[in-house]
Image (cartoon, grey):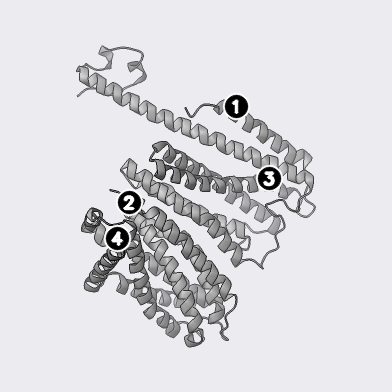
Amino acid sequence: MYSKGLRPLAAASVVSLAAALALVFFYAPNDADQGFIQKIFYLHVPLAIVSLCGFIAGGVMAIGYLRSRDGSWDMRSYVAIHLSLVLAVGVLVTGAIWAKGSWGHWWVWDEPTLVSFLIVFLLYCCYQPLRFSIEDPERQARYAAVFAIVAGAFVPLNFAAVRLAQAFSHPRVLTTTGGNMPGEMRLAFYVSLAAMALLFVTLWKLELASKHAKLELKRLRRRLEADLEAEGAAPAVAAPGPSTAAVPAQPMGG
Amino acid sequence: MRRAVGAILRKDLAIELRTRESVPAMVLFSVTVFVLFHFGLGRDSLDGDLAAGVLWVTLLLATVLGVNRLFASERDQGGIDGILLAPIDRTAVFVAKAAVLLLYLAVVELVAVPAFGLLLLGPSLLDALPELLAVVALADIGLAVVGALVAGIASETSARDLLVPLLLLPLLVPVAIGAANASEPLFRELSSAEDLGKWLGLLALYDGVFALVGFGVFDYLLED
């Protein structure tokens, strides 16, 4: 059910990523101020936007879980946060490279967006430890959902607080909204953003499909074992068939 | 709701008065951290941003101790079963726990802030006192609300002692920003209130948002 539409989606994200890279390197002009290093902006900012949206979407899906108690919403929320965390590592690494290239330091504390992002990253790093230190699966989903909602509410608040703390310290060379970019740069940026969003959705669906398949396999395997036990059958060799052949080296029966 | 909150609050305060576990530990911890900062920074007296930072980082860390113990009696002695069996709104637990933590913090600060003034702060604490009280009050509400929420989230996990600080401290960064920036001009040689409204506004917004979130989600933590 999750793999539906995965193929065209994957194709679309490959095409748009290629188009974005082509636009970034051959169409958008070099930044007059920062030169070539500014090109990392087309990777860094879309990564950051998509990852933050993923965190917040994870919170919204967690609300969906608490309202419906449908485990698939929990799975969606989990995969969204998990993927956003992976993208967030990319954001911090590209941000550090950019900072080194344009300001000469690997980390700058007076760039509020980067600092807020680090705090959000540190918070979400606890999502998996929290989740997997609870054994009961239903309770695990419930607690993870509460965490996802609290953290989702925290994200915008944290950005506001960090921005306030540094309101007068640093002129913003590049606004993330693209307010002062020339047209070519803006086009390249929006295409990159769309490509990154498509990539995120593709990966999200892929991960969901794989998790779903894994669960389904486990369920089938368990049912098969139960059937065999009920029949009092001898090991798998005694009952050869297409379904048992899919269970390699599984100790069966008592 | 009000009676349930009162009952849980009385129970927790009675336990704390008899065992004296959390509050003395938090006070001792705060004073010890002030001593550590004295040696770590190599300074006899602090003022301005350094003073504000030391005071608020210490109070935030002391909060972690209180949050870790907040559900201790429910967890260790099965008190949570009694609460869950009682026909009360589960949100009452959140309100009561936040109120308990708020009281703990108030008592801790009653000792720790004067101790900070005596041990480390260069300028006089008295000049800054009226504004500082407002900052402390708003920051404490934020600490209590988020602390109760995190204590609830972590209470059922197997690694709760590790998870509480890891969850709590990033969530408290806005409190640290607001409280430290509001206190910084108060702790200067010539105490003045600069941008106080902006930072108090931030703290109030934080308190409001997380109080609402807590009201909304806390009962999901106590379902079984």
| Distance between mark 4 and mark 1 Cα atoms | 50 Å
Chain letter of the residue beneath label 4 in the structure image: B
Write the residue at 36% across / 13% down. A242
Q: Quadrant of the C terminus of chain A?
A: top left
Q: Nearer the viewer, mark 1 or mark 2?
A: 1
Q: Is residue A188 left or right of residue A52?
A: right
SS under mark 1 = helix
Chain letter of the residue beneath label 2 in the structure image: B
Q: Nearer the viewer, mark 1 or mark 3?
A: 1
Name the residue beneath numbered marker 2.
Answer: B157
Q: Is residue B23 above or below residue B223?
A: below
Name the residue beneath numbered marker 1.
Answer: A8
Do discs 2 and 4 belong to a common subunit?
yes
Name the residue beneath numbered marker 3.
Answer: A42
| Distance between mark 3 and mark 2 Cα atoms | 40 Å
Name the residue beneath numbered marker 4.
Answer: B71
Three-letter amino acid code at the position of disc 1: Pro
Three-letter amino acid code at the position of disc 4: Phe
Residue A71 placement: quadrant: top left
Question: Badge 4, how many Cα within 10 Å: few under 14, some, many 20+?
Answer: many
Question: Badge 1, how many Cα within 10 Å: few under 14, some, many 20+?
Answer: few
Three-letter amino acid code at the position of disc 2: Thr
In the rendered structure, are the residues bearing label 2 and label 4 in contact, judged by CB atoms less than 8 Å apart? no
Q: Is residue B217 left or right of residue B131?
A: left
Do discs 3 and 2 belong to a common subunit?
no
* Image spot of residue B85 (x, y percent): 22, 53
Three-letter amino acid code at the position of disc 3: Tyr
Q: Nearer the viewer, mark 4 or mark 3?
A: 4
Do discs 4 and 1 belong to a common subunit?
no
| Distance between mark 4 and mark 3 Cα atoms | 47 Å
Is tag 2's residue or tag 4's residue first in the polypeptide sequence? 4
Chain letter of the residue beneath label 1 in the structure image: A
